[in-house]
């Protein structure tokens, strides 16, 4: 469960629920570097349209990787026991106060039929504004095993941390 980067100290718990995007970001970066490294040397045998289409694909991949790195991978939820507050921290930009421990509830949200993910939200507003803290799980056997592992190693420690005084 290293892909969630769960860290627990006596006064803070932090989780990076989107850190699992890192392999995809690395793959997109490698593919775009290959495109921009190889395509310039194919002037003699590669069609003009194909060459510039490849450049376009490489640019889209690199922009997508940069966007995911800045706005998804670096997102961290910080549970501060001293203040009993949950923060959302986007490392290079800002720290946002989300809710107190008393207001927090964990819900299951479904974006598509047959999928489910865990999210945190304020008790009376959980369906209007919530924050995903897990990967998407499906009904497959492998996904059920991943969900069970997530519940045991990530979700239960979060609940225990929030409920402990």
Image (spheres, rainbow, N blue to C red):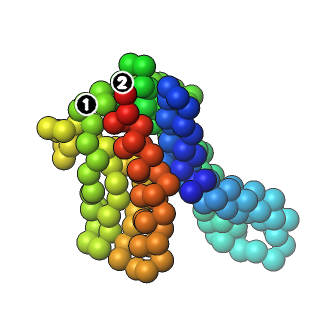
C-alpha distance separating marks 1 and 2: 8 Å
Identify the residue position indicated by label 2 in the image: 84
What residue is shown at x 27% (from left), y 57% (from top)? 109
Packing grade of label 2 (10 A; few <14, some 14-19, many >=20) is some
Q: Residue furthest front?
A: 165
User: Residue 91: horizontal and vertical position, in percent?
Assistant: 55, 30
Residue 102, disc: 1
Decide which of 93, 36 is in the foreground and name it.
Answer: 93
Q: Is residue 91 above or below residue 160?
A: above
Left/right of residue 4 with respect to residue 50 in the rendered view: left
Q: Residue at x 37, y 49 (%)?
A: 132
Answer with the quarter of the image where residue 117 lies: bottom left
Which comes sooner in the sequence, label 1 or label 2? Answer: 2
- Tag 1: Cα neighbours inside 10 Å, few (<14), some, or many (≥20)? few
Rendering coords of residue 33 (x, y %) = 75, 57
Q: Is residue 83 above or below residue 120?
A: above
Q: Quadrant of the N terminus?
A: bottom right
Rendered position, 9 above or below 63: above
Counting from the top left corner in percent of width and height, residue 75 is at 50, 39
Can you tell which quarter of the image residue 66 is in?
top right
Identify the secondary structure beneath mark 1.
loop
Pick the residue in front: 12 or 21: 12
Secondary structure state at the residue bearing disc 2: loop
Q: Looking at the image, is 153 positioned above or below residue 149?
A: above
Q: Are marks 1 and 2 in contact (CB under 8 Å)?
A: yes
Do we see residue 58 in this rendering? no
User: Which residue occupies 64% across, 59% down?
Assistant: 23
Give the left or right position of residue 54, taking residue 73 as reference.
Answer: right
Name the residue at the left extreme. 124
């Amino acid at each position: 469960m290293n892909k969630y980067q769960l860290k627990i100290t006596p006064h803070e718990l932090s989780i990076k629920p989107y850190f699992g995007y890192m392999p995809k970001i690395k793959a997109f970066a490698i593919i775009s570097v290959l495109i921009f490294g190889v395509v310039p040397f194919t002037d003699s045998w590669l069609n003009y349209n194909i060459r510039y289409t490849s450049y376009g694909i490489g640019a889209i991949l690199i922009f997508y990787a940069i966007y995911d790195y800045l706005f998804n991978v670096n997102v961290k939820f910080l549970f501060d026991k001293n203040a009993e507050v949950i923060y959302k921290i986007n490392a290079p930009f800002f720290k946002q106060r989300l809710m107190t421990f008393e207001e927090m509830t964990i819900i299951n949200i479904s974006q598509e039929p047959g999928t489910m993910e865990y999210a945190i939200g304020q008790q009376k507003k959980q369906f209007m504004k919530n924050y995903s803290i897990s990967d998407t799980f499906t009904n497959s056997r492998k996904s059920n095993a991943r969900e069970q592992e997530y519940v045991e190693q990530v979700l239960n420690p979060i609940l225990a941390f929030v409920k402990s005084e």
